[in-house]
Amino acid sequence: MHIQPDDPLRDDVRALLEEHLRHMHSLSPPESVHAMDWGRLRAPDITFWSVRDGEGLLLGCGALKALDARHGEIKSMRTTEAARGRGAGRAMLNHILAEARTRGCVRLSLETGSQPGFVPARTLYASAGFVECGPFADYVIDPNSVFMTLELPTQPAARA
C-alpha cells in the first residue's frame, strides 16, 4: 500500500467521496452529517491523502484538518468496499497519526456517527487509543454524533 498526498478532484477519489457522502446521508439526518465534500477538502488547512495498492488502485482516503497549531481533526476517512478488511483504513489512520505528531500536534480529534453503521469506525479509532469526549471546535452536542480524541505524546527534546 502506498499513501500519498492526492487531489480530491481526481476522478476515482471524487467518486469515493461522493459515495461517502451518500452513505453518511443514508445513516444520519442532514444536520448531523459532518463529512466534507471534495471541494471543502481542498482548503488550505486540510491535507488530503489517498491509499493505493501497488497497481495504483484506490483503496481509501483520509485527511487531517488543522484546528490550531497543536490540535488536528481527522476528516473523510473512507475505504472502498473492495478494500474493507485489508488494512487500508488502519494504514491511513497510522499515517495521519504519524503526520500529526510530525506537525507538533498534541491532540487529535474526530467526529463519527452514533448509529450501528459506524461501529467499525468507532472500533478502529478506539483500538488506536481514541476515547470519547465532548464536542470540540465548532461541533455541538448531537445524539447522532460521537466525538473522540487522542492525546499525542510529545516528541522528546533532542540531546546535545
Image (cartoon, rainbow, N blue to C red):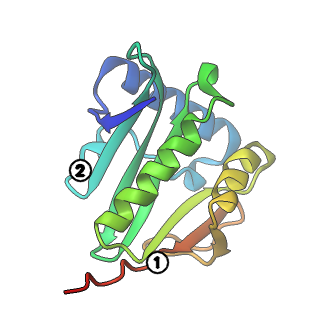
Are circles 1 and 2 on residues that touch, CB within 8 Å? Answer: no
Tell me: residue 143, above or below residue 158.
above
Horizontal side of residue 90 vs 154, given as left or right: right
* Label 1 residue SS: loop
- The kind of residue tagged 1 is Pro
- Give coordinates of residue 74: x percent, y percent: 46, 56
Quadrant location of residue 41?
A: top left
Horizontal side of residue 72 vs 46, given as left or right: right
Q: How many marks?
A: 2
Q: Residue at (25%, 43%) from the top-left corner?
A: 42
Tell me: residue 6, above or below residue 110.
above
- The kind of residue tagged 2 is Ala
- Give coordinates of residue 93: x percent, y percent: 51, 50
- Give coordinates of residue 30: x percent, y percent: 58, 47
Q: Is residue 58 visible in the rendered structure shown here?
A: yes
Q: Residue at (56%, 75%) from the top-left corner?
A: 135
Q: Is residue 38 visible in the rendered structure shown here?
A: no
- Give coordinates of residue 64: x percent, y percent: 37, 55
Q: Residue at (61%, 35%) from the top-left corner?
A: 87
- Numbered disc in front, either 1 or 2: 1
Foreground pick, 154 / 117: 154
Horizontal side of residue 145 vs 15, given as left or right: right
Name the residue that disc number 1 marks.
153
Quadrant location of residue 148?
A: bottom right
Q: Which label number is shown at residue 43?
A: 2
For marks 1 and 2, the one nearer the N-term is 2
Outermost residue toward the right in this view: 116
Label 2 packing within 10 angstroms: few (<14), some (14-19), many (20+): few
Tell me: residue 133, above or below residue 66.
below
Label 1 packing within 10 angstroms: few (<14), some (14-19), many (20+): few
Outermost residue toward the top in this view: 55
